[in-house]
Image (cartoon, rainbow, N blue to C red):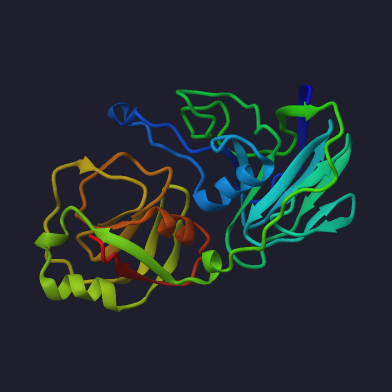
Amino acid sequence: MKKSEGILEVIKPGFYGSIQDHGRFGYAHWGIPAAGAMDEQSFLLANHLLKNAPNDACLELTMIGGEFRFLHPTTIIVTGAPIKIQVNGHTYPINHVIDIAADDFLKLSPAKKGCRIYLGIDGGFQTEEVLGSKSWYAGITKSNKLEKGMRLSYQAATNERPAAHAKVAMDDALFEDEVLEVYPGAEAAEMDEALFEQLLTRDFHLSAKQNRMGIQLEEKVDNNLSEILTSPVYPGTVQLTPGGQLMILMRDAQVTGGYPRVLQLSPQAISCLSQKKQGDKVSFKLIDEW
């Protein structure tokens, strides 16, 4: 299929949107976070169903959705949190590949459940690449948040595509599961055994203090650990503050930290947590293979 430049015009940007791929790696020594799609599972599904490369950039939207106009033909898909998807007023299901004509209007509703929505496009969004990644991050890329009137480039289709496309049912587990699989963190062995057990036997709730950098949990736990020398941290690292607060680092987190690292989320748990909202309940389960 021949390609030319296509443009997506942002009519309503929603609450918080950004271009994301897998993220940028190998620059932690410069203090540069990895960034990348919060819900990697839904991101990969979008590219898989579009027959894109796994790392092709998608538009990540948070809770609200948005409105967009395609100035050129292409093919798209919406994955992640279940929402109402309308193209020129016609409704499509989640995880369904959709052919787009020039001047088509896309409206995405607020999420019914879950938190993050992924708009994938044939060939991926062709936005600025910095240090091997298109993922937006303040201070690294020119843009870090979707704004009204923005125009995002993609590879427009100049030939018609087949009308039939693959689709899959929504994975409810990503939104319904409350259990997050974890490994012991680097400082877990220094915790009192009873205190560590407390982490694994009680429920926690997401607080309002959350963004792409990290999520703070409401409930506190006893802390008998001292602060550590600044050490490496990663997406999914669970830090325990001196006051007993648990902080779960996410994709835009810093690369070092001085709070004890008591748990480490699995990649699947990071995706699951990224679909949780304020007040949602979670608990931790130690992975047996550790």
The quarter holding residue 252 reads top left
Q: Position of residue 258 (x, y in %)?
A: 20, 47
In the depicted view, which residue is nearer to us: 140 or 112? 112
Look at the picture and state if 37 lies above or below 115: above
Viewed as shown, does residue 237 lie left or right of 160?
Answer: left
Residue 203: horizontal and vertical position, in percent?
36, 77
Pick whichever, 89 or 99, lies toward us. Answer: 99
Please say whether residue 252 is visible from this viewpoint.
yes
Rendering coords of residue 268 (x, y %): 43, 57
Is 68 rendered above or below residue 195?
A: above
Q: Nearer the viewer, residue 70 or 287?
A: 287
For image coordinates 64% across by 63% down, the residue present is: 170
Q: Quadrant of residue 3?
A: top right
Left or right, residue 77 beside residue 36: right
Q: Quadrant of the N terminus?
A: top right
| Place of residue 123 in the rendered image (x, y in percent of width and height, measured from the top left) | 67, 32
Task: Look at 56% across and 26% down and name the residue there.
Answer: 142
Q: For the C terminus, give its image quadrant.
A: bottom left
Tell me if I can see residue 39 in this picture: no
Residue placed furthest toward the bottom:
202
Q: Is residue 69 left or right of residue 47?
A: right
Q: Quadrant of residue 74?
A: top right
**Residue depicted at x 69% and y 55%:** 95
